[in-house]
Image: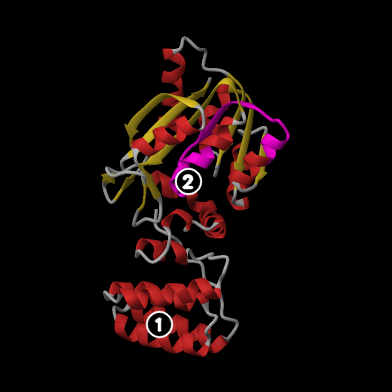
Amino acid sequence: MAVLQLFLSSGDLTADRRFEIARELESRGDVAAAIDVLTQTVELAPGFASAWFALGELREKTGDRAGAVAAFNGARDADPDDRLGATLHLARLGAADASAAMAAAYVRMLFDQYAPRFDEALAKLDYRGPDVLRSAVEAACRANDRIMKFGSVLDLGCGTGLAGVAFRRYADWLVGVDLSAAMVAEARGKGAYDRLIVADVMAYLADEAAHDAHHHLVVAADVVPYVADVTPLAAAVAQLLYPDGLLAFTTETHDGGGMKLGDKLRYAHAAAHVRDALAAAGLVVVSLDPCSTRSEAGNTVPGLVAVARRV
């Protein structure tokens, strides 16, 4: 799924126009001229985050890593909320801590932009996350002679509600939470949820714990790739599970250790990292299997599907 580019105006019509000229030059293949125009633009408007960000992208294309790092730093300084995701690019270039690079404002803006076309975009990627997740939960229930029926189900990062549709018939009460208001609006249109909340996932879990709320099943389809460390998420979910309650999620993976920030600005987690995170949360791993929830450029993206149980 390509990243849509948010435009943040400089507030200066001349600077904004120069940005447009630079983008036009880039589209014609004249990257050097585009870099020149953008360099002049940020001199004219030092607080122009979009121009700094575009300059970083183009400098990286030409192999100017130091220049790209300087420009992405300029974008982050100009927009401290980091709605453009400059810190992710700095982390990818080895100039920032990858574990703290995923800004909430970036994720919110990204999915607010994508919401109207999100389902269509995923269909082109042969996205199958909810089906993979449902099959894993079904297998876990069969292995324990358990009926595939849950009183309360919580869908973390519910997006447009695809997982909600997949799990609706197995839930007496289905709650969805997502950081993006536009995605929640799309989910509401599917009519699968009993309750929908716009909130940061970790903040929501903390609030639920403070109110002694519990769920029988917590699912997260394609959410963990936006989480650097699975450990805090697993620990927060564990507090909300009833005894024998299940946590099920998908993530992307890699052959190394720990987590890795990929070129698509999503985190991949090694199987050992997932196992350690679940164990640290006091959860028992029911299954942890290779899977792929999407394809990109004709290739399946390696992933994992995990199901864990609270003792």
Tell me if 216 is positioned left or right of 271 in this view: right
Q: Residue furthest top?
A: 145
Q: Residue at (48%, 33%) from the top-left corner? A: 280
**Distance Cα–Cα, label 2 vs label 1:** 32 Å
Tell me, for residue 271, which label it has, or none. Answer: none
- Which of the two discs, 2 and 1, sits closer to the camera? 1
Q: Please, what secondary structure does the residue beneath circle 1 have?
A: helix
Identify the residue under disc 2: 119
Q: From where the camera sits, is residue 247 visible? A: yes
Mark 2 belongs to which amino acid?
Asp
In the image as oriented, which residue stretches furthest toward the right? 211
Observer able to see residue 127: no
Q: Is residue 61 left or right of residue 91?
A: left
Residue 54 lies, with reference to residue 260, above or below; the image says: below
Of the residues under marks 2 and 1, which one precedes in the sequence?
Answer: 1
Q: Residue furthest front?
A: 280
| Residue type at numbered disc 1 | Ala
The percent position of residue 107, horizontal first and vertical second, equals 52, 55
Tags 2 and 1 touching, CB below 8 Å: no
Magenta region, residue range: 207-233
- Which residue is tagged 1? 22
> In the image, is residue 90 part of the stretch drawn in magenta?
no
Q: Can you say whether 302 is above or below 67 in the image?
A: above
Residue ID at (54%, 52%):
115
Q: Secondary structure at mark 2?
A: helix
Q: Position of residue 44 (x, y in %)?
A: 51, 90
Q: Nearer the viewer, residue 253 or 181?
A: 253
